[in-house]
Image (cartoon, rainbow, N blue to C red):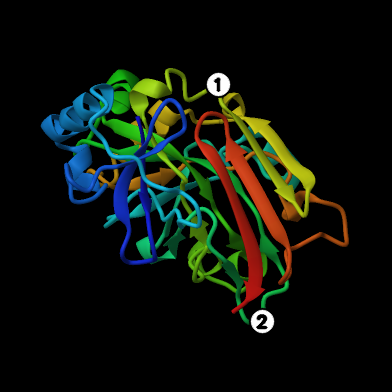
Amino acid sequence: MKLLRVGTAGSERPALLDAEGTLRDLSGIVPDIDGALLADDAALGRIRSAAEAGELLALDATGLRVGPPLARIGKVVCIGLNYHDHARETGAEPPAEPVIFFKAADTVVGPNDTVLVPRGSVKTDWEVELAVVIGRTARYLESHEEALAHVAGYAVAHDVSEREFQIERGGTWDKGKNCETFNPLGPWLVTADEVPDPQNLSLRLWVNGELKQDGTTAEQIFPVAEVVRYVSQFMTLYPGDVINTGTPAGVALGQPEPKPFLRAGDVVELEVEGLGRQRQQFKDA
């Protein structure tokens, strides 16, 4: 299933995109798309049954904003340097273990919402990523099979980053990752049953119509199953938590000088195979 949330910011309603591309209203069946829903097999079954029976009312998508596909996100865990090609382009050694940092849940915005270039920023960068959404509480998972069984679904994430803040301003990466609007998510949460192999997905990103990133999750140093298993050794993952799993080569940081960092007025488009497409215009904060 392709689950999403539509409407003005803060007032989104749950919806489903059916196989024919028609938007369907879920507000009569579930209150929202969130961790509580993802952990409730019976509620998910009601959605699936209603969709298969043709019982869901169609919504007019004209002019309707698409919000983040997940409400009340607990935490956003991010994996750094998780693609062989991205490590090569930045001159970094592939890590021996996954690099973990966090984005605050309030950085998450809709897939087509405006993204703000922070005040004083000269190195705002793009990163298309596969996001993993957790559906069952995960502690100390032992196997890859067990890890994948705790995944509710997948989505497109844009891990917008400010490289000067991240690398040159001291401290941890977090100050370059948590600026307002720095994590567009969606358009859909695609349930795990529709993504049989998360290590066989293409990822692409364009800036002002020019293709910048063209990669595949097959290049991940630590695959999705290992990322989920590994993270569960250090923290409890709850339904509705999100893991951004890293970006392939092609970011501005890896380009020759002068590096083409983002400025107000730039338009970024990105997609992950089968998970939908995003489009953001950048403006000054």
Check disc 2: other Cα within 10 Å, few if <14, some if 14-19, many if 20+: few
Residue 217 point in image, percent of width and height? 57, 29
Residue 124 point in image, percent of width and height? 67, 65
Write down the quadrant of residue 248 in the picture.
Answer: top right
- Mark 1 to mark 2: distance in Å? 38 Å
- The answer to which of marks 1 and 2 sits earlier in the sequence is 2
Residue 276 point in image, percent of width and height? 53, 38
Of the numbered discs in the image, which one, if any, rests on residue 124?
none
Residue at image point 23% right, 50% down: 32
SS under mark 1 = loop
Of the numbered discs in the image, which one, if any, rests on residue 200?
1
Residue at image point 56% right, 26% down: 201
Q: Which residue has dot 2 on it?
A: 120
Residue at image point 50% right, 57% down: 63
Residue at image point 51% right, 53% down: 111
- The answer to whether residue 236 shows anywhere in this view is no
Going by the picture, which residue comes out furthest to the right? 257
**Mark 1 touches mark 2? (CB < 8 Å):** no
The amino acid type found where label 1 is placed reads Asn
The amino acid type found where label 2 is placed reads Gly
SS under mark 2 = loop
Residue 119 point in image, percent of width and height? 62, 81
